[in-house]
Amino acid sequence: MKENARSGSAPASESAPGSPPASRGESALLLVVLLGIIWGTAFPVIRAGIVGGAPPLLFASVRYLLTAVALVVIALVARSDLPRLGDLLPPAVFGGLFMIGLYGGLLYVGENSTSGGLAAVLTASAPLASALFGYRMLPGERFGRWGLSGLLIGFVGVGILVLPQLVAPSSTGFVGPALVVAAVLAFAVGSVLLRRSSRATPGLWTLSVQFAVAGAFVGALALLTQEPMTLGNGGTVLPALAFLVVFPGILGYSLYFHIHHTAGPTRANIVGYVNPVTGVLVGLLVFGEVVTGVEIGGLLLIATGLFLLQRDPLRKLASPAPASSTATAGRDES
């Protein structure tokens, strides 16, 4: 998501005259599918880095800090405008701390003792959680009957898609799943509060600040939990870091915050339904895994949910908060 922070930008959902709401909703969902493809590839790469000897929290911290440095370099080369200090506060707190740092830290640790299928279902609840938190705080982004039906059908599809893993869970207890749920709630709350507190267009500098905050926070957690301060000697760690910085990091989060700014957090968080689909396709195309009839049923339900979500018109969002109140507005996430 490329961002040039301008405090006086128009509401993201107000597109050019003559652009029908339905077409804008369809465009947002197409971008969500693209984002799901990009982010879906991150999970096996993260796993490869951890298996290669990188401690989870340190691995995440280094990834976030390298992404922040890369974004600063890009911003300098592109001569991107520096945002005002007050405009950086909500993204730093709700985007950097909640959505990237807290979410990533809890998720990385939680998945150590949670089966992949259960983690997929729990993380796919992000759209539902966003819709719940945003019901009162973001009334202009509520779904209609088509959208609500699509949310529920898509969630059921995710559950069916990972059913084989769910019936044989590898979880060692409740701590791991509880941490994954906490990660999802942090992400959902952050996204809604970010939307409520800041409507400034996200930019390169803003995104770099978010990753810097996230990297510092997760790094502090690594120190507190006394993780080894070495990434190990595995040959997969450095290639995994490079991939995560460029694709899920710079490209993926830039795209996410663009969708978040233009279509709202609930629609942006629908990406949680697309990630498991990417995992199935990667297994089929890269590793030659067989796709079962149950998985095909789950894919069809997810596709049906996305179709119904596309039919739900994108409502006009409320006007952005005055620039003078941005720094003191409520929390945000991204």
Image (cartoon, rainbow, N blue to C red):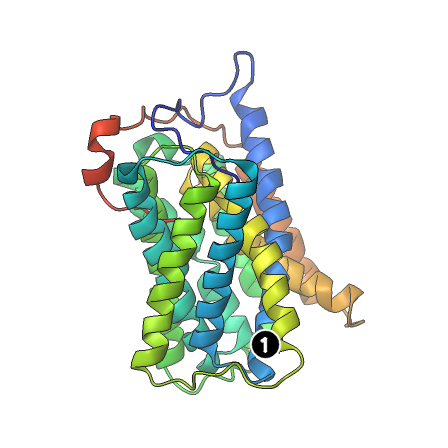
Residue in front for this viewpoint, 318 or 206? 206
Judge left or right: residue 244 versus residue 85: right
Determine if residue 299 is in view. Answer: yes
Secondary element at tag 1: helix
**Which residue: 33% across, 50% down?**
92
Residue 9: percent from left, percent from top: 39, 24
Residue 178: percent from left, percent from top: 35, 73
Residue 23 is drawn in which quadrant?
A: top right
Residue in front for this viewpoint, 285 or 144? 285
Residue in front for this viewpoint, 98 or 265? 98
| Amino acid type shown at disc 1 | Gly
Disc 1 packing (10 Å; few <14; some 14–19; many ≥20): many
**Which residue: 44% across, 28% down?**
12
| Image vertical order of residue 303 relative to residue 315, above or below | below
Q: How many marks?
A: 1
Check disc 1 and report the residue beneath it.
49
| Image vertical order of residue 131 relative to residue 320, above or below | below
Residue 201: percent from left, percent from top: 42, 33
